[in-house]
Image (spheres, rainbow, N blue to C red):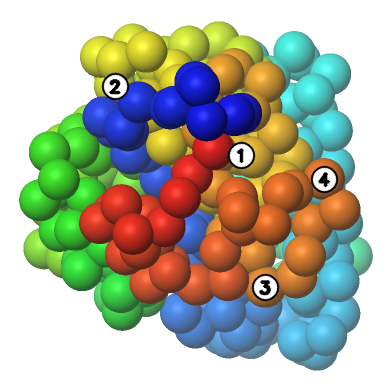
Amino acid sequence: MNETTPRLPIQAVFFDAIGTLLTPNPAPADVYTEVGRRHGSELARAEIAQRFRQAFRAEEEKDFEAGWKVDAEREYLRWSNIVASVFQGTGAAGLANAIFLELWEHFAQPEAWRVDPDACAVLAEFSKHGNLLGIASNFDGRLHRLLDAMPELNLISKRILSAEVGWRKPDRRFFDAVIRAAECPPDRLMFIGDDPVNDYRPALEAGLRPILLAMESGRDVAEGRRVHKLRELLDFGSGRQGFD
Ligand SMILES: [Mg+2]
């Protein structure tokens, strides 16, 4: 980037959902522990947290092996498998399906999530500058229900969900769907997410203008392309902060 080739202003801003605009609250480990306990599980929270991480990673691996192809059925199976893995070998194993159904419903409720307190102001700022706003998520169809119930996020007009696209992040075909929805050239599309592997890197490779939301410095992320908190994006929206 040099002075003779100024970047055109952004036209659209797309956000990852989970970990970027929304966070589960209370934490999943707490919810799993409590629901499990109600069904007879005696697993400690720390054990559940560890099993959850492991099971989650195993499902990510399956998606990778499937070439990142996903659909609604796969999303349902993902969470069913994770819950079954977490409660495997415990007294509650036979009840894993009942636990799963209860957890599935829990995370479909808007009350189970916390919207970033600055999300509304950040969206309003981008919107004020004429940017189209979208959400681009690997979360399943339950996200529609959540978004419908969250007035703080109602400036978001485009929803790109991997299970509906057929391909999940980090696959290029998911980002192609984002570009189509944004109705602008990729280099005028800002993409904000908290995951270097599923958000930042593939967005960069697809020619978008990615921002990583992260507390810590990422080794591969230029300083000007990282924010610690969503509210720092207010500077990008107003154009006060440069972006190359
Ligand atoms: Mg995320």
Kindly tell me whether residue 147 is visible in this rendering. no
Kindly tell me whether residue 128 is visible in this rendering. yes
Q: Which residue was labeled with disc 3?
A: 215
Confirm if mark 3 falls within 8 A of ligand 1. no
Confirm if mark 1 falls within 8 A of ligand 1. yes
Name the residue at 61% across, 29% down: 1
Instruction: Indicate which disc residue 182 carries.
Output: 2
Q: Earlier in the sequence, mark 4 or mark 3?
A: 3
In the figure, 190 relative to 128: above or below?
above
Q: Which residue was labeled with disc 4?
A: 220
Count neighbours of disc 4 (C-alpha within 10 A) and say few if under 14, some if 14 to 19, many if 20 or more: few
Say if mark 2 contacts mark 3, CB within 8 Å: no
Q: In the rendered structure, which amino acid carries the disc numbered 1?
A: Asp
Q: Is residue 16 left or right of residue 119?
A: right
In the figure, 29 relative to 235: above or below?
below
Instruction: Indicate which disc residue 44 carries.
Output: none
Q: Which of marks 4 and 1 is nearer the N terminus?
A: 1
Q: Which of marks 2 and 1 is nearer the N terminus?
A: 2
Q: Which residue was labeled with disc 1?
A: 199
Count neighbours of disc 1 (C-alpha within 10 A) and say few if under 14, some if 14 to 19, many if 20 or more: many
User: Which quarter of the figure has residue 216?
Assistant: bottom right
User: Which quarter of the figure has residue 62?
Assistant: top right
Badge 3 marks a residue whose secondary structure is loop
Q: In the rendered structure, which amino acid carries the disc numbered 4?
A: Asp
Count neighbours of disc 3 (C-alpha within 10 A) and say few if under 14, some if 14 to 19, many if 20 or more: few
Name the residue at 57% across, 79% down: 27
